[in-house]
Amino acid sequence: MQWLNPKYAYEGLQEFLGTGGPVLLAIMIATFVMWTFIMERYSYYYFAHKSMKKRLQNEWNAREDKRSWRSRAIRDDLISQVKVGTDQNVGIIKTLVAIAPLLGLLGTVWGMIEVFDVMALSGSSNARLMAGGVFKATIPTMAGMVSALSGLFFSNQIERRGKRETAYFADSLEIG
C-alpha cells in the first residue's frame, strides 16, 4: 500500500525520470499534451457534437428551398462545419504520436553518448561502466514507443469516428 502514498509516487516518478535522462521529461510532457487532446476529443463527442449536429440539422430543415444551387452550397457548408468540428486537434494528436518515438530515439542517442563518454574517461571497455549508459538509452526508447502506440490507437479511433459522424450527418440532410 506504500505505492498509494503520493509522496512515494512522486519519488518514484523522480527516480524514473532521472534514470531516463532529460529526454524522458520531454516524452512525458508530449504524452501529457497528447492525452489532453485525446480527452478533449472524447469530451467533444460526448458533450458538444450532438448539440451542434442538432442545431445544424434544424437550420437545414427550416429551409424551404432544398434543391437550388445555393441550397446545395449551404448544405455543403453545414457538412463542412461538422467536419471541422470532428477533425479539430486530430492533426496535433497525430503529430505528437509521430514525435514520441523520435524523442525515444533521441534518448537512445543521449544514452549512447554517455556510454562513449565513459569509454573515453575510463580508457577501456569496462562493461559495468557502460551498462548504466545502455540502460539509460533503453528507457526513453521504451517510453517513446509506449506513448506512440497508445496514442496511435486512439488517434485512429477518433479519426474514424469523425469520418463516420460526418458521413451520417451528410446522409441526414435530405435534398429536396
Image (spheres, helix red, strand yellow):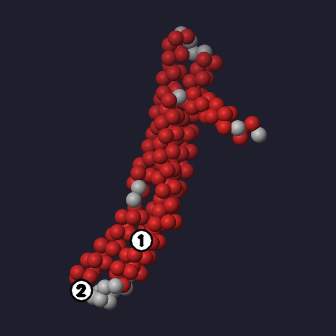
Disc number placed over residue 24 in the picture, else none:
none
- Name the residue type under label 2: Ser
Q: In this view, does 16 lie to the left or right of 65?
A: right
Image quarter (top left, top right, bottom left or bottom right) of the N terminus:
top right
Location of residue 103 in the rendering, given as x and y in whole percent from the top left corner: 46, 37
Q: Is residue 54 above or below residue 84?
A: below
Q: Residue furthest left?
A: 69
Of residues 13 and 20, the one drawn nearer to the viewer in this rendering: 13
Residue located 53% across and 45% down the image: 147
- Give the percent coordinates (x, y) of residue 49: 45, 68
Residue that appears at 48% across and 48% down: 34
> Which residue is nearer to you in this view: 32 or 7?
7
Residue drawn at 66 percent across, 34 percent down: 7
According to the picture, the residue beneath numbered tag 2 turns out to be 68
* Badge 1 element: helix
In terms of depth relative to the viewer, which is nearer, 65 or 136? 65
Picture coordinates of residue 156 (x, y %)?
A: 48, 59
Can residue 167 be seen from the camera position used here? no
**Among the two numbered marks 1 and 2 on one chain, the one whose residue lies closer to the N terminus:** 1
Q: Where is residue 20 in the image (x, y as percent from the top left)?
A: 56, 30
Q: In this view, does 143 lie above or below 109?
A: below
Amino acid type, residue under disc 1 in the picture: Met
Q: Tell me how far mark 1 sits from mark 2, CA to CA.
A: 24 Å
Question: How would you rate the neighbour count of disc 2 (Cα within 10 Å): few for under 14, some for 14-19, many for 20 or more?
Answer: few
The image's mark for residue 52 is 1
Q: Can residue 18 be seen in this view?
A: yes
Mark 2 secondary-structure assignment = loop
Q: In this view, does 109 lie to the left or right of 65?
A: right
